[in-house]
Image (spheres, grey):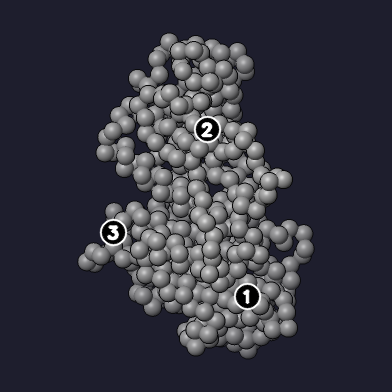
Amino acid sequence: MSTRTARPLGPQLALAGTVGKRVDVLVIGLTSTSDGPEIALGDGIVDESVLAGLLDRFVAVGAKGKAEETLRIPAPDTLGVDSVLAVGLGAADKLDAEQIRRSAGAAARSLGGVDTVATTLSSLDLGAAAEGFALGAYRFTEFKSAKSAPGPDAQPVSRVELLVSSPRTKEAKETLARSAAIAEAVATAREFVNTPPSHLFPAEFAERAKALGTEAGLKVEVLDEKALEKNGFGGILGVGKGSSRLPRLVRLSYSAKKRNAPKVALVGKGITFDTGGISIKPAAGMENMTSDMGGAAAVVATVVLAAKLGLPVDVIATVPMAENMPSSTAQRPGDVLTQYGGTTVEVINTDAEGRLILADAIVRACEDDPDYLIDTATLTGAQMVALGNRTPGVMGTDEFRDRVAAISQAIGENAWAMPLPAELRSDLDSKVADLANVTNHRWGGMLAAALYLKEFVADGVQWAHIDVAGPAYNSSGPWGYTGRGGTGVPVRTMISVIEDIATHG
């Protein structure tokens, strides 16, 4: 069992009406206009004459207000802080919550070594500013020794005071509490993804998920390899049997304790490392397959978040966990396995393993008779070919698919609705079993994977499959509130969909 000590996943967030005495840096926002940059600020928080002087000084050092541009200058004595950081917000007529979130994140990333900051970005959008600062300040340094750990001048911001005109109102407090909880959930998912596979294998992942669920008051069930075999979870066992670290299935259940509450099932792919199995991947970049449990990480974080927010929706997460390794006990191309529920599958490519563990979990999730089912996975390289590294693909039942995509776009994770072409389905037929796990061609790989999953979704369930192969892991440079490594996508999409279900059914 894990004996890991929890650590803070972000800075302390607090509401404030004025710039406090402990503040080291004031962060303001600049928009870009045809007449040059302008300070974006709600009324009454900082003196207008001070702001006018600040704007002149920022213009003098070349500020443009370009999105996520950061410039820092010494503060005038009247402000009572050491320095002022201006972060660009882009065009004033296009400013939205996501840009505020990204700019807040860029500001947080640029403030290494600063203890306490105050910001006026919160006067534009409190929730977005809080999330952006919290996630921009996130760092994963657990495995850095004293030789390479960040020194005092590189430590992330430890406290952010969010300036608003009325910090004591119930609305402001509730907005901050929600945004802080969301940021913590996204950071939790990032933490799982960033933990190397040497330290996060199926049994350990299950223990950590169980600990989080128990702390949040969830009902927790963990099936080990013996229980999986007894109950016929052939997909999870088939994928996991090549590893000495055997698979698990974790169930985390949140009950709203309300009569006739909508029921949402969540399923996430938890491949703690993916070599491809016998159909082994190329060596280059394989280290990034530590992220192949990004869907599971997001699902675990989301069900815990739903409980913390006390949403009037029942949420049940079914999370399969396995390590896909080549060995003398691994499944082979050409093997036939039996998914949970009885469907037989010819395994043509052992690197198409995510759909095998998801299918088992989807059938089990549908036994709970949910109204809605969301599954998410780092499922196909084809997702990145089609949509790039930052745009999740959403497939599923048409109405719910479109609803999930629209909500995702509104909150800044930008998922895009994709079709399930009927003509691809026959390419999943097998000569020897009910299904093959891949088609015999490379066309529409993301769509074919979703068509495979569709076979296991119960009739009458509104379903959305979110492929986050690229968006769940950032292997390039940081941007906005996203650093290198795990991103936490699509936690914010899933919790926003659940909140929308709570409101609209």
Circle 2 or circle 1, nearest the eye: 2
Residue at the image point whose x is 40% and y is 15% from the top? 47
Is the residue marked by circle 1 packed among few (<14), some (14-19), or many (20+) residues within 10 Å? some
Residue of label 1: 245
Residue furthest out toward the right: 283
Q: CA distance from mark 2 to mark 3?
A: 38 Å
Q: At numbered mark 1, what does the secondary structure look like: helix, strand or loop?
A: loop
Q: Is residue 88 above or below residue 399?
A: above
Quadrant, the C terminus: bottom left
Q: CA distance from mark 2 to mark 1?
A: 42 Å
Residue 184 visible (yes or no): yes
Marks 3 and 2: in contact by CB < 8 Å? no
- Say which amino acid is labelled 3: Pro
* Quarter assignment of residue 497: bottom left
Residue at the image point whose x is 53% and y is 85% from the top? 226
Out of 427 and 392, give the one closest to the viewer. 392
Circle 1 or circle 3, nearest the eye: 1
Marks 1 and 2: in contact by CB < 8 Å? no
- Say which amino acid is labelled 1: Arg
Is the residue marked by circle 3 packed among few (<14), some (14-19), or many (20+) residues within 10 Å? many
Is the residue marked by circle 2 packed among few (<14), some (14-19), or many (20+) residues within 10 Å? some
Marks 3 and 1: in contact by CB < 8 Å? no
First of labels 1, 3 by sequence position: 1
Out of 33 and 278, give the one closest to the viewer. 278
Q: Of the numbered discs in the image, which one, if any, rests on residue 343?
A: none
- Say which amino acid is labelled 2: Asp
Residue 382 position in % (x across, y down):
64, 61
Residue of label 3: 312
First of labels 2, 3 by sequence position: 2
Q: Of the numbered discs in the image, which one, if any, rests on residue 115?
A: 2
Residue 187 position in % (x across, y down):
51, 50
